[in-house]
Every structure is written in structure tokens, then in C-alpha cells.
Amino acid sequence: VVLQHHERMDGSGYPQGLKGESILLEARILSVADVVEAMSSHRPYRPGQNIKMALDEIKTSRGVKYDAKVVDACLKLFHEQGYRFSA
């Protein structure tokens, strides 16, 4: 799962350039979670972006880089169920 979490649905990811259903579902879930968390978290080299920007990124790449069903589930958690990251 960890090995594949930088793979993308369109084959543009790494390390193996896997695409679509050849990427484990768990890795597709971790991929979306990783992008949202990484973009919205503070790093030593940059401040965190607001959660809207992170969610816009996965929405824009829905079905291209990221699994559409996984993106939909993530967006539902934030928009419909009010999920928030801890401060």
C-alpha cells in the first residue's frame, strides 16, 4: 500500500507507473488522504494551505489522478459530515 500511494489513476505516478485498477484500493485511499493532509499541513518550508485548496485539488483531478469514488467519499466526509483536522 505504501509503495503504491504515489501512483496515479492515469499512470503518471511513481514508482511503477501503475494505472487504474492495478493500483490497490487501499493505496488509492491513502493517496487522496496524503494529498489532502500534505497540502493543508504546515511544513518547515511553507505554511499549510487552507482545506478548501486541498479539496479543490482532489476535485479537479477526480477520475484523472485520483480514484473518483475515493475523492467522492473524501469530499463527503468534509462537506456533508463536517469532518475537520485537529488543530
Image (cartoon, rainbow, N blue to C red):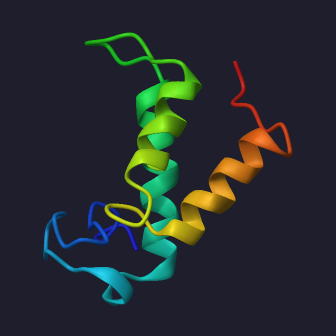
- Residue 64: x, y in percent? 33, 64
Which residue is most to the right? 81
Q: Residue at x 86, y 45 (%)?
A: 81
- Residue 83: x, y in percent? 78, 39
- Residue 80: x, y in percent? 83, 45
Is residue 45 visible from the viewing direction of this image?
yes
Q: Is residue 59 above or below residue 71?
A: above
Q: Residue at x 57, y 27 (%)?
A: 52
- In the foreground, 31 or 71: 71
- In the foreground, 23 or 76: 76
Which residue is most to the bottom? 22
Is residue 37 visible from the viewing direction of this image?
no
Is 22 on the left or on the right of 63, as rendered?
Answer: left
- Number of disc labels: 0
Q: Residue at x 48, y 61 (%)?
A: 30
Tell me the quarter of the picture where residue 11 sits.
Answer: bottom left
- Residue 41: x, y in percent? 48, 24
Q: Is residue 38 above or below residue 2?
A: above
Is 73 on the left or on the right of 25, as rendered?
Answer: right
Q: Residue at x 74, y 32 (%)?
A: 84
Q: Is residue 78 above or below residue 71?
A: above
